[in-house]
Amino acid sequence: MAGHVIDNPLTGEHIIIRKTAAETGGRLLAWELVLDPGGQVPSSHSHPEQEECFTVIEGQMRFRVGWRRLTIGPGESIRVPAGTTHHFANAGASAAHLSVETRPALDAEAMLEVAAALGREQFEARRPLPRPIELALFMNDFEREVRAPYVPAGVVRLFTRPVAWLARLRGADIHYCRLRDEADADRPGLVDGRHAGSRGTL
């Protein structure tokens, strides 16, 4: 919902939702990102169907977009086309503040929420890596919203779909589903023609 705050201590991200998919008819998710000093997304990634536009309000940000590397400051923007591998990090000694637009919204708000929930647990448990089963469930649920870099989608599905199917068959997905349902509870209604709580394709 608008105004909802999502914190991820693993990455140093603090996200404030400004316009939801429900409010924009699925066209846009508008959000603000406050990134702690040293904060960064955990790995390079792409959004196969979504374009992102980042505008720096305060601080300095370092981006890698495709093969380009650049640092931008207040008032500067960068656009990441759909399907483009990218990474970003705080390049300064103080918190960076950005305005972000994701088009179309799809299920990006739930993706951010679930990623943060998984990150909080990983941070509290001091695990260097996420649990493989939960990572597979996450990538399966949000295959339209996020993708691993440099690996064809079909190859990723050869891993994520069987693992997700087995996890759900054996009840190993209960913890992950609880996190997903908590995220969906903040987002009632339809998103891009499907219920916000729908699961990925199996």
Image (cartoon, helix red, strand yellow):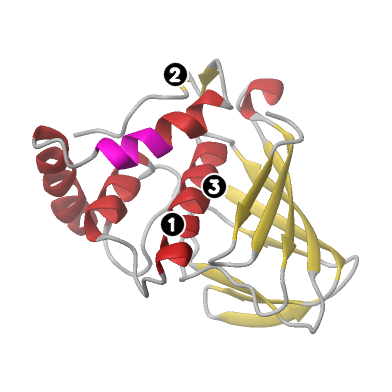
Q: Identify the amino acid type marked 2.
A: His
Q: Nearer the viewer, residue 16 or 105?
A: 16
Magenta segment:
174-179
User: Which mark is on residue 195?
Assistant: 2
Query: What residue is drawn where x is 69% and y is 50%?
Result: 15
Image vertical order of residue 122 relative to residue 140, above or below? below
Q: Main secondary structure of the magenta part?
A: helix
**Residue carrying label 3:** 112
User: Which mark is on residue 121?
Assistant: 1
Whether the magenta-drawn stretch holds residue 150 is answered as no
Alpha carbon separation for disc pair 3 and 2: 17 Å
Whether the magenta-drawn stretch holds residue 178 is answered as yes
Query: What residue is drawn where x is 81% and y is 62%?
Result: 97
Among numbered discs 1 and 3, the one appearing first in the sequence: 3
Among numbered discs 3 and 2, the one appearing first in the sequence: 3
Query: What residue is drawn where x is 42% and y is 24%?
Result: 197
